[in-house]
Image: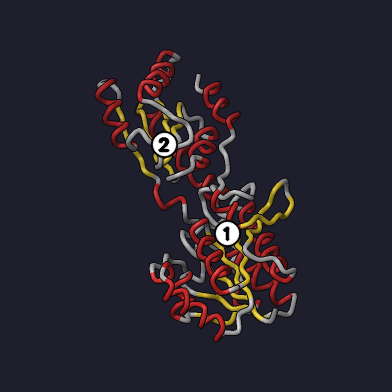
Amino acid sequence: MNAIAVVTSGGDAPGMNAALRAVVRACSYHKIRCKGVRLGYQGLITNDIVELGPRSVSNIINRGGTILKTARSSDFKTKEGRQKAFENIQKNNIDGLVVIGGDGSFTGAMTLEKEFGIKTIGVPGTIDNDIFGTDSTIGYDTALNTAMDAIDKIRDTATSHNRLFFIEVMGRDAGFIALNSGIASGAQDILIPEKKDDIETLFSSIERGEKAGKLSNIIVVAEGEELGGVYDLAKFTKMKYPKFDVRVTVLGHIQRGGDPTCADRVLGSRLGIAAVEGLLNGKSAVMAGIRSNKVVYTSFEDAIQKQNVINKELIRIVEILAR
């Protein structure tokens, strides 16, 4: 290979810059040209492609977000848009593509490989930790610590005023952030998409806490939980227990930002290098991941179609600790 391009696509995640930096410097180490695509797949369509060298990525390993920017491209979903992207790939003499993103980004990379034969490797960058084929995704550890820190601060005011807080964290389809941040911050109950909850079970948990002498409570809710969302849950709880001082906090995009943790910087560095060296070794249409602390490659089909499974032991731990 003479040139590899790197693109950050979909939602941003802390540690993407670390992965980007690793891709660029791995290319330099192996004496390959590296190009950066701005604004995700849209940059391939508009030819927003720049040359990157080791100094282009200085002092970014500690920064959240992505210096290449990211966006979702509706044009890329069309055959005409992908044809234009392919023409720009050829124009820039690009032999391989590293895509840092989630399952939607990998779907785009897999389509490019199937339609035009472009060699592609994915790097899992998403705070949700819902990509199959890796023990952790880039950004997950940072988001987890951000959520935990915020919940700890909310607990201070909940305790001071004897309040019941419903706290919504990100996780439209996966409850990894909610489950782990909830355990780490001592939540009374945790509601996630993978666990079929009902309102009566929630009320029983709240009553159990009250009987145990708890004057304040934290309920952590993943945004994809099916009971109706934090505002409806707060309303139903207030109707059931009028004496409770019920409040709601939605953490929102604060979980996407901030400086990446040590774990995410190291993970991004390992996977960025693994992606480049995977391309050099002839791999394509796969995602680089870490399992049992070793680099592995998983087909895009499996990474997209399968999902990381919630550890049921953690759900049991929640039940034991909420006493």
Residue 239 placement, left or right of 96: left
Quadrant of the drawing holding the N terminus: bottom right
Which residue is pictured at 45% across the width and 77% down the height? 45
Which residue is pictured at 30% across the width and 37% down the height? 231
Q: Residues within 10 Å of mark 2 (few under 14, many from 20)?
A: many
Residue 124, percent from left and from top:
58, 57
Residue at the bottom extreme of this rendering: 91
- In the rendered image, the vertical position of residue 258 relative to residue 208, given as above or below: below
Q: Secondary structure at mark 2?
A: strand
Q: How is the image coloured?
A: secondary structure
Residue 27, percent from left and from top:
69, 75
Q: Secondary structure at mark 1?
A: loop
Of pointers 2 and 1, the one earlier in the residue sequence: 1
Residue 12, percent from left and from top:
48, 60
Q: Nearest the camera: 33 or 218?
A: 33
Q: Nearest the camera: 240 or 124?
A: 124
Q: Nearest the camera: 245 or 72?
A: 72
| Residue type, label 1 | Gly
- In the rendered image, the vertical position of residue 210 relative to residue 303, given as above or below: above
**Label 2 sits on residue:** 221
Q: Are marks 2 and 1 in contact (CB under 8 Å)?
A: no
Distance from the alpha carbon under mark 2 to that under mark 1: 25 Å
Which residue is pictured at 43% across the width and 52% down the height? 254
Residue 301 placement, left or right of 168: right
**Label 1 sits on residue:** 15
| Residue type, label 2 | Val
